[in-house]
Amino acid sequence: MGQILLVRHGQASFGSDDYDALSPLGFEQSRLLGAALAARGIEVRTILGGAMRRHRETAETCATAAGWAGDLVVDPGWDEFDFLSVLAVHPPAHGVAEPTKAEFQRWFEEATAAWIAGVEREYAETFVEFNARVRGALARTVALAEDGPVAVFTSGGPIAWAVAEVLATGGNAADLWTRLNRMSVNAATSRLVTGSRGLNLLTYNDQSHLDAVPGAVTYR
């Protein structure tokens, strides 16, 4: 039975000049995760990640704390969707003023809803293309897991789609993705197992390694 540990990156530097870099809290979240995995005796054969800086920094920090050896294998299929391009083609209701957190969340949800619905706009990547990209990355990871456990350092969007693909029935994967992605915690883990019964979900969005540290649970 193959095992896949999906890890959302630690908190990125939202609102800074380089959003893709981890914030100081993001590094600490990643370290806490690695220490918790080491305490549980969790080992992996392959360390996999998307091509984004926040994926790499989370992977390196977590792996060091966990005592894992081996280089990060990069698969861009695990990259997050380009939410900035999605927002750019969807005018915000709050106008040109700097949005509050509530206004940004409303803008983000309205823009992604239009993206999912396939509204004709100039997107860098359509929702259908995003689905296909993550589906391909997941298939490659399942193949790697045949040789031993794999840890994947990625983002909330790809993790939510991978889980939606496993759980969805009756064509409701897009709705399930929206609900799963909305509550994704930084540096949380989800676990998949693959075997004779196909791909199945063990846990989703586990944040237990962060719960005892005040302020360590974040969503953006």
Image: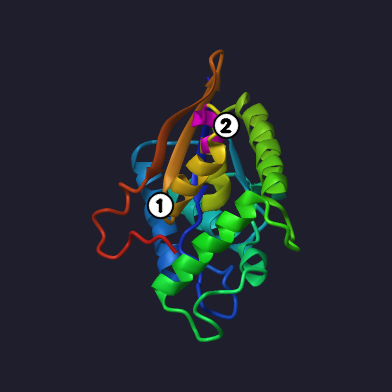
Tell me which residue sits at (60%, 75%) in the image. 18
Instruction: State the CA–CA distance, disc 1 to disc 2.
Output: 21 Å
Query: Along the polypeptide, which appears first: circle 1 or circle 2?
Result: 2
Q: Quadrant of residue 148?
A: top right
Q: Which mark is residue 183?
A: 1
Q: Between residue 184 and residue 151, name the one nearer to us.
A: 184
Q: Among all residues in the image, which is located at the extreme top?
A: 196
Q: Amino acid at mark 1?
A: Met
Residue positioned 64% across, 64% down in the render? 86
Residue 171 image label: 2
Mark toward the viewer: 1 or 2: 2
Q: Is residue 13 left or right of residue 37?
A: right
In the image, which residues are magenta? 164-169
Compared with 18, 106 (above or below) is: above
Q: Residue at x 51, y 43 (%)?
A: 175
Whether residue 84 is situated above or below residue 173 in the rendered picture: below
Labels 1 & 2 near each other (Cβ < 8 A): no
Rendered image quadrant of residue 37: top left
Numbered marks: total: 2
Q: Amino acid at mark 2?
A: Gly
Per the picture, the main secondary structure of the magenta-coloured stretch is helix
Residue density around tag 2, few if under 14, some if 14–19, many if 20 or more, within 10 Å = few
Q: Nearer the viewer, residue 135 or 42?
A: 135
Could you say whether the residue bearing mark 2 is in a helix, strand or loop? loop
In the image, taking residue 9 as reference, residue 132 lies left or right, namely: right
